Amino acid sequence: MKMVTAVIKPFRLDDVREALAEVGVHGTTMTEVKGFGRQKGHTELYRGAEYAVDFLPKVKLEVAVADDRVDAVVEAIIEAAKTGQIGDGKIFVHNLEQVVRIRTGETDRDAI
């Protein structure tokens, strides 16, 4: 099993959710986060004063999937989140040791 974590632009969230549903993903966790990479933030003007915005708003999605579904999930996220502009985000894939559904006690693949 794998955990796929994607950090994307907030306005692409609905498109990514739809793309994940099309490849059979029915559950995901979404967190509003802030960060920066090569974008390095920007400056804004507020009431006549200019200030730096170092951390940009992003959305972090976490999806637990079976090993054989990872490529389809990653590809769906890429296609739906990509704008071609700097700051489109990143996808991280890492191993899951164990998954347990609290309500039923199901484990691993059955719990996903």
Image (cartoon, rainbow, N blue to C red):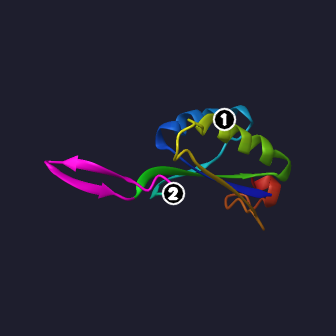
Q: Amino acid at mark 2?
A: Gly
Mark 1 Cα-neighbour bin, 10 Å: few <14, some 14–19, many ≥20: few
Write the residue at 53% across / 39% down: 85
User: Does the magenta segment cover residue 80?
Assistant: no
The answer to whether residue 18 is left or right of residue 70 is: left
The magenta segment? 37-54
Identity of the residue furthest to the bottom in this view: 97
Mark 2 Cα-neighbour bin, 10 Å: few <14, some 14–19, many ≥20: few
Image disc number at residue 69:
none
User: Does the magenta segment cover residue 47?
Assistant: yes
Task: Label 1, secondary structure: give it.
Answer: helix
Task: Label 2, secondary structure: give it.
Answer: loop
Image disc number at residue 37:
2
Quarter residue 2 falls in:
bottom right
Write the residue at 41% across / 53% down: 56
Identity of the residue furthest to the right in this view: 68
- Tell me which numbered mark, 2 or 1, is placed earlier along the sequence: 2
Query: Relative to 48, is 2 above or below?
Result: below
- Determine which residue is flagged by label 1: 79
- Percent across and percent down for residue 41 are 40, 54
